[in-house]
Image (spheres, rainbow, N blue to C red):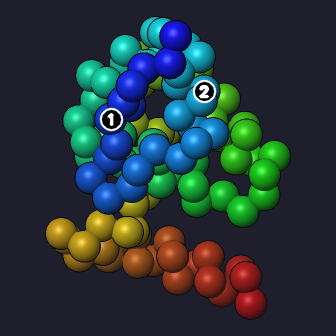
């Protein structure tokens, strides 16, 4: 049974692979639908932030597991940088600057 609609985040829509995983797990989907749009947005961004397909698959699997455990936000996530309704905090700016130096 695939639901007609899975609620999105404040900035991000639910990508197809995450939508499929949520649709296949009733308890994770119920938890997902109980989240605020900001919390859903954090999960979506956390899943989309990785570069490799295998890592993304692992993030989606962990999302489903964590939702089943009742978690409401991804652990150790500095937050979505795509939101335009607020400035990026100094701590997030520091994390992002460290990442760009490692990529160089």
Q: Residue 26: x, y in percent? A: 48, 9
| Depth order, front residue of 69/51 | 51
- Looking at the image, which residue is at 57% across and 37% down? 18
- Answer yes or no: is residue 66 visible: no
| N-terminal label among 1 and 2 | 1
Callout 1 crowding tier (Cα within 10 Å): few <14, some 14–19, many ≥20: some
| Depth order, front residue of 43/8 | 8
Q: Secondary structure at mark 2?
A: helix
The residue indicated by pointer 1 is: 7
User: Toward which corner of the image does residue 11 lie, by quadrant?
Assistant: bottom left
Callout 2 crowding tier (Cα within 10 Å): few <14, some 14–19, many ≥20: some
Identity of the residue furthest to the left in this view:
85
Query: Do the numbered discs 1 and 2 sit on residues whose CB atoms are within 8 Å?
Result: no
The residues tagged by marks 1 and 2 sit, at their Cα atoms, a distance apart of: 14 Å
60 lies left or right of 89? right
The residue indicated by pointer 2 is: 21
- Looking at the image, which residue is at 53% across and 47% down? 15
The relative height of residue 54 versus residue 100 in the rendered view (above or below) is above
14 lies left or right of 83? right
Q: Secondary structure at mark 1?
A: loop
- Answer yes or no: is residue 43 visible: yes
Specify the label residue 22 is tagged with.
Answer: none
Report the number of numbered marks: 2
Q: Residue 3: x, y in percent? A: 42, 20
Q: Residue 78: x, y in percent? A: 43, 57
| Depth order, front residue of 26/84 | 26
């Amino acid at each position: 049974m695939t639901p007609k609609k899975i609620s999105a985040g404040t900035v991000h829509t639910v990508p197809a692979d995450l939508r499929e995983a949520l649709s296949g797990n009733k308890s994770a989907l119920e938890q997902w639908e109980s989240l605020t749009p900001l919390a859903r947005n954090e999960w979506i961004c956390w899943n989309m932030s990785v570069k490799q397909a295998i890592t993304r698959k692992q993030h989606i699997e962990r999302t489903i597991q964590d939702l089943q455990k009742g978690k409401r936000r991804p652990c150790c996530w500095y937050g979505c940088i795509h939101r335009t309704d607020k400035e990026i905090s100094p701590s997030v700016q520091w994390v992002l600057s460290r990442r760009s130096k490692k990529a160089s």
